[in-house]
């Protein structure tokens, strides 16, 4: 696949850093050879790539903090990295930068069944927390579809969500305390195990900050009891708009499903031959609507869910008969991205959010854009959160297809903003959506973001060029007024 490269020659100060890093990280903990650096060139969004100067793999929080301190002294940018499953280019390096991989910090430090918390290192996989808590009847609720691989540090940095976040909240709602290494090499503690902590809510500020303010070196997360029972309704619709309306009706009826996901026909057609989940191939769209709780609560809620979906025009409603069937229904949804990868040489996953009442109108508008850009799009998303994931299918080897895909994706995000939504629901801004930040925010808000960044990272060394555009960039993008074309902090790099 062709890629947008972000490479330049390393500076003298960057080269001088290597011996100091090597001394601080003995053994295999510093990678500098081209073949070792290759896997770190990009994240899950492979259209942007860059070769770093080095990859540091510290085994302790203190060593991670030391890497940050050495990079600050050398004036070299640092990019934190978990599993690299991000979809917005957040962990993608530039030439001359150091990737700080948290992969070796992968221990579950403590599970306290009485306090119902888990204390974990940042490189622990999301699913590993629930697996470790399962014998105690507990689990960690936020469940990104990438949970088999993605790390809790990456989840915090992106404020990740998943199928069950509609009822149980995003990462930020399930996080109690963080240890964060600053660019100075200090380790600070944010939050508390109590429900409230004094002072500014820096825990919330760090959650979703995409590695721009500090590096998570430990997280304490909330565990909740596994529900006694869960069942899912698979509802088929002959019209995508009706399925979108059913989502708004379910929420409007005061039902909070444990999960509420929508897949359109192209997504169903990709998934069913791959997973054999039992999805109806003739449906224009399906909804997966889960209820959990006691058996009595679930039985009562399922009846209400079916009634609302039938009234909205569902042509068929099937309720999972046992746990194996429930897991099979969800397996299709969870494998939707790889399934789409089988039917197209490349796909580009967008991530916008909109008010649920606008779902039908926005899905219809995306159909119109397919015609405008001459590209197909499969929709599979967290409908209950109004969090869209249009997957634009393209072939990077065909001239102009990547360019049209990016324009298509940008137009979807701007459509979300026009409907009162936002340019990202959970995948973060990264490199990918940085220009759309100029659509979402005015210069006043961006100045506040820059002031915060300046307070934690005055030289702009933590993950530069990601998530928050400079006012200069927005002025070039031409969507907003900029105060005299000046940055609020002229010393920050102007990417
Ligand atoms: C198939 C697939 C399905 C997905 N489904 C979902 C989904 O349902 N919901 C969802 O929210 N996301 C989803 N994602 C996106 C991705 O998995 C999440 O954003 C995840 O949280 C990234 O974790 P990671 O460990 O891979 O982080 P990385 O990709 O390594 O990094 C992501 C960002 O976090 C920063 N970062 C990483 N570790 C730290 C740290 N310790 N301290 C500070 N900053 C850090 C990086 O600098 C980068 O900006 C999906 C991705 C794929 C490939």
Image (tube, helix red, strand yellow):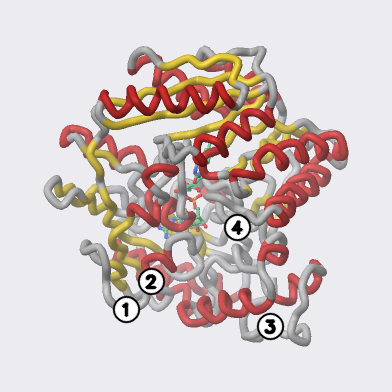
Q: In which quarter of the image is residue 61?
A: bottom left
Q: Do callouts 2 and 3 mark residues in contact (Cβ within 8 Å)?
A: no
Q: Do callouts 4 and 3 mark residues in contact (Cβ within 8 Å)?
A: no
Q: In which quarter of the image is residue 153?
A: bottom left
Name the residue nearer the viewer: 191 or 314.
314
Classify 447 as above or below 110.
below
**SS at circle 4:** loop
Name the residue nearer the viewer: 229 or 105.
229
Q: Name the residue under label 1.
A: 199
Count residues near mark 2 (Cα–Cα under 10 Å), then give few for <14, some for 14-19, many for 20+: few
Distance from label 1 to label 4 (Cα)?
A: 29 Å
- The earlier-in-sequence mark between 1 and 3 is 1
Count residues near mark 4 (Cα–Cα under 10 Å), then give few for <14, some for 14-19, many for 20+: many
**SS at circle 2:** helix
Label ID, residue 202: 2
Name the residue nearer the viewer: 469 or 71.
469
Residue 175 horizontal side relative to residue 156, left or right: left
Q: Could you tell me residue 495's position as x and y percent? A: 69, 70
**SS at circle 1:** loop
Callout 4: CB less than 8 Å from ligand 1: yes
Q: Do callouts 4 and 2 mark residues in contact (Cβ within 8 Å)?
A: no
Distance from label 2 to label 1 (Cα)?
A: 8 Å
Q: Could you tell me residue 25's position as x and y percent? A: 35, 62
Q: Mark 4 points at which residue?
A: 430
Distance from label 4 to label 2 (Cα)?
A: 21 Å
Q: Do callouts 2 and 1 mark residues in contact (Cβ within 8 Å)?
A: yes
Q: Could you tell me residue 109's position as x and y percent? A: 20, 51
Residue at image position (40%, 75%) is: 69
Q: Name the residue under label 3.
A: 487
Distance from label 4 to label 3 (Cα)?
A: 20 Å
């Amino acid at each position: 696949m062709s890629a947008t490269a972000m490479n330049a020659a390393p500076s003298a100060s960057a080269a001088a850093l290597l011996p100091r890093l090597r001394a601080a990280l003995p053994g295999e903990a510093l990678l500098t050879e081209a073949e070792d650096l290759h896997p770190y060139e990009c994240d899950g969004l492979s259209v942007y790539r860059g070769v770093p100067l080095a990859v540091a793999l510290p085994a302790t929080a203190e060593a991670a903090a030391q890497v940050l301190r050495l990079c600050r002294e050398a004036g070299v940018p640092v990019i934190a990295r978990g599993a690299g499953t991000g979809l917005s280019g957040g962990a993608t390096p530039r030439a001359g930068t150091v990737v700080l991989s948290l992969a070796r910090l992968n221990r579950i430090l403590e599970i306290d069944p009485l306090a119902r918390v888990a204390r974990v290192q940042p490189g622990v996989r999301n699913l590993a927390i629930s697996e470790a808590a399962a014998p105690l009847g507990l689990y960690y609720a936020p469940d990104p579809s990438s949970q088999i691989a993605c790390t809790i540090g990456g989840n915090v940095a992106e404020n990740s969500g998943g199928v069950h976040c509609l009822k149980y909240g995003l990462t930020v709602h399930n996080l109690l305390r963080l240890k964060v290494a600053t660019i100075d090499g200090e380790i600070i503690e944010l939050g508390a195990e109590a429900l409230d902590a004094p002072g500014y809510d820096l825990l919330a500020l760090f959650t979703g900050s995409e590695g721009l303010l500090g590096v998570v070196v430990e997280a304490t997360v909330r565990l909740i009891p596994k529900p006694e029972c869960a069942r899912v309704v698979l509802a088929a619709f002959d019209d995508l708009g009706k399925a979108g309306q059913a989502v708004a009706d379910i929420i409007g009826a005061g039902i909070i499903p444990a999960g509420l996901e929508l897949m359109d026909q192209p997504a169903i057609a990709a998934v069913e031959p791959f997973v054999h989940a039992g999805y109806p191939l003739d449906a224009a769209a399906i909804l997966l609507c889960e209820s959990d709780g006691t058996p009595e609560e679930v039985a009562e809620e399922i009846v209400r869910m079916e009634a609302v979906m039938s009234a909205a025009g569902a042509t068929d409603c099937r309720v999972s008969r046992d746990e194996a069937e429930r897991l099979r229904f969800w397996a299709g949804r969870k494998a939707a991205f790889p399934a789409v990868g089988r039917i197209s040489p490349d796909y580009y996953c967008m991530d916008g959010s909109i008010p649920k009442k606008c779902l039908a109108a926005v899905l219809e508008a995306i159909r119109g854009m397919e015609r405008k850009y001459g590209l197909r799009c499969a929709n599979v998303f967290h409908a209950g959160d109004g969090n869209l994931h249009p997957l634009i299918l393209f072939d990077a080897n065909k001239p102009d297809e990547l360019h049209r895909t990016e324009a298509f994706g940008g137009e979807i995000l701007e459509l979300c903003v026009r409907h009162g939504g936002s340019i990202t629901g959970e995948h973060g801004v990264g490199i990918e959506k940085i220009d759309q930040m100029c659509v979402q925010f005015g210069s006043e808000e961006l100045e506040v973001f820059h002031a915060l960044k300046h307070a934690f990272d005055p030289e702009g060394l933590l993950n530069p060029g990601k998530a928050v555009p400079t006012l200069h960039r927005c002025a070039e993008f031409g969507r907003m007024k900029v105060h005299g074309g000046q940055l609020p902090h002229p010393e920050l790099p102007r990417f």
